[in-house]
Amino acid sequence: MVAVGRIGRPHGVRGEVSVVVTTDEPEQRFAVGTVFELDAGRRVTVAATRWHKGMLLVCLEGVADRTEAETLRGAELTVPVDELPDPDDPDEFHDHQLIGLRAELADGATAGTVRDVLHGPGGELLVLARPDLPDALVPFVRDIVPTVDLPAGRVVLTPPEGLLD
């Protein structure tokens, strides 16, 4: 399962919830009729969506009031991995494809393992778990991560001096 959003606070009194979107294509992923698994194994179906002040608001079938919506706060909205379409661009990847990859330097030395992908206003960052060292944040840009080799289970890094210190 892959998380594509997280339910935030209720909006209004009719059961609408805000959603923190973690997918690049919210219009497709949150289309009316889409069924999500919640982290507790419960299923919910999108009844309606709208954007309000930059926030995605979603009406879910069976959630009729603010009290019911509040019980969903913090729940992850997930879909099966096989429901995600492959990216059209060969230089784009889903987070789940990157997490767990071995990170190597150009000389073959192991730099760590991709533990997470952070999406920020400046772009994506790979979070590298490193044995006996704190996690490292690596900008996910071609100059620093020139190779993503999914079949081999690795990314190759050419970090500037000091990035991994």
Image: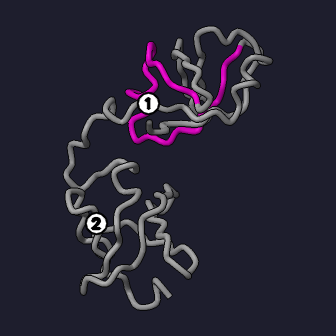
Q: Are marks 1 and 2 in contact (CB under 8 Å)?
A: no
Residue 34 is drawn in which quadrant? top left
Q: Position of residue 149 (x, y in %)?
A: 22, 62
Whether residue 61 is situated above or below residue 79 in the rendered picture: above
The 10 Å Cα crowd at callout 1, few under 14, some 14 to 19, many 20 or more, is some
For the point 31% across and 51% down, which residue is it? 93
Q: Looking at the image, is mark 1 or mark 2 earlier in the sequence?
A: 1
Badge number at residue 10:
none
For the point 46% across and 57% down, which residue is it? 117
Whether residue 48 is situated above or below residue 30 in the rendered picture: above
Badge number at residue 79:
1
Q: Position of residue 165 (x, y in %)?
A: 50, 88
Q: Position of residue 101 (x, y in %)?
A: 35, 62
- Quick check: is 26 in the magenta stretch? yes
Q: Is residue 149 visible?
A: yes
Badge number at residue 154:
2
Q: CA distance from mark 1 to mark 2?
A: 25 Å
Q: Secondary structure at mark 1?
A: strand
Counting the numbered discs, the total is 2
Q: Amino acid at mark 2?
A: Arg
Q: Position of residue 49 (x, y in %)?
A: 53, 20
For the point 40% across and 91% down, which residue is it? 161
> In the image as oriented, which residue stretches furthest toward the front?
131
> In the image as oriented, which residue stretches furthest toward the right?
67
Question: Which quarter of the rendering shows the N terminus?
Answer: top left
In the rendered structure, the answer to whether residue 74 lies left or right of residue 157 reads right
Residue range (magenta):
15-38
Q: Amino acid at mark 1?
A: Val
- Quick check: is 145 in the magenta stretch? no
Whether residue 73 is situated above or below residue 132 in the rendered picture: above
Instruction: Give the camera-side residue of 37 and 92.
Output: 37
